[in-house]
Image (spheres, rainbow, N blue to C red):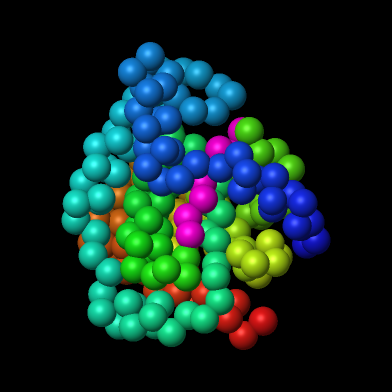
């Protein structure tokens, strides 16, 4: 994968902060719309559910002391460039966690871009050929070099869905319920741990 620094720069230049991303999604919802190229009642419904989820996570997610300690050892500046959409259920569970993580370190910055408005970047970070989101591109802020990627789900959550799809050929409604329950019990810890490990690896590049 050879992602050019100019593509990274262009993506960051048209990105949202977390606060502005939330405002953008909310403003569209007020007009009965969702983010993305496709509009439907289902996507608007998902976006509405996700607003509630993100509001809850903004209030309840806490970064454990051991992760704060690891973040405190970061020496380089890193940008978490995240591909997302307002209707995406996994993004609603994960992006607020990323925001909490970034708030713990002055070495971290969070930038969010919309998948359907950033085809070139998305196509460089496919997951098994699919445009799965959220997708994190970890960027060294000073050089704009991509140092790794993560997503669309933490390992155990991804395994839950992959196992169900392998067994049934499609992702079942039960698996979708199980996934939401998994996120609820995990409290963002797996996402924090995996992204922190990605950051630690990037520090050594």
Residue 78 horizontal/vertical position (percent): 55, 67
Q: Is residue 89 magenta?
A: no
Could you say which is closer to the camera, residue 128 or residue 93? 93
Which quadrant, please, contains the N terminus?
bottom right
Q: Magenta span covers which residues?
A: 109-116
Q: Identify the residue shown where x is 59% and y is 24%.
A: 37
The spot of residue 92 in percent (x, y) is 37, 45
Height in image: 85 above or below 149?
Answer: above
Percent x, y of residue 83: 56, 47
> Can residue 129 be seen here?
no
Name the side, left or right, on which 174 lies relative to 18. Answer: left
Q: Residue at x 45, y 24 (%)?
A: 34
Mainly helix, strand or loop, the magenta region?
strand
Q: Residue at x 33, y 18 (%)?
A: 30
Task: Say if 122 sits above or below 36 in the image.
Answer: below
* Res 118 → quadrant: top right
In the rendered view, would you say 157 is above or below 30? below
Residues 52 and 8: in front is 8
Residue 124 makes an appearance in the image: yes
Residue displayed at 45% across by 74% down: 196
Q: Is residue 110 highlighted in magenta?
A: yes
81 is higher (above) or lower (below) than 86: below
Numbered circles on residues, count: 0
Residue 110 coordinates in the image, percent (x, y): 47, 55
Residue lying furthest top: 31
Quarter of the rendering occupied by the C terminus: bottom right
């Amino acid at each position: 994968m050879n992602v050019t620094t100019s593509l990274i720069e262009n993506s960051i230049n048209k990105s949202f902060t977390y606060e502005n991303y939330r405002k953008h999604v909310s403003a569209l919802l007020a007009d009965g719309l969702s983010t993305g190229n496709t509009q439907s009642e289902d996507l608007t419904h998902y976006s509405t559910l996700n607003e509630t989820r993100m509001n809850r996570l903004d209030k309840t997610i806490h970064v454990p002391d051991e992760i704060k300690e690891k973040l405190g050892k970061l020496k380089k500046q890193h940008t978490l460039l995240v591909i997302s959409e307002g209707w995406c259920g996994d993004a609603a569970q994960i992006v607020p966690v990323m925001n909490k993580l970034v708030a713990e370190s002055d070495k971290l910055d969070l930038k969010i871009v919309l998948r359907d408005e950033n085809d070139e970047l998305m196509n460089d970070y496919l997951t098994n050929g699919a445009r799965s989101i959220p997708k994190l591109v970890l960027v060294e802020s000073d050089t704009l070099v991509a140092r790794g990627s993560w997503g669309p789900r933490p390992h155990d959550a991804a395994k839950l869905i992959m196992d169900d799809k392998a067994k049934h050929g499609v992702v079942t409604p039960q698996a979708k319920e199980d996934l939401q329950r998994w996120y609820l019990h995990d409290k963002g810890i797996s996402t924090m741990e995996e992204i922190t490990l990605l950051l630690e690896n990037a520090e050594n590049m």
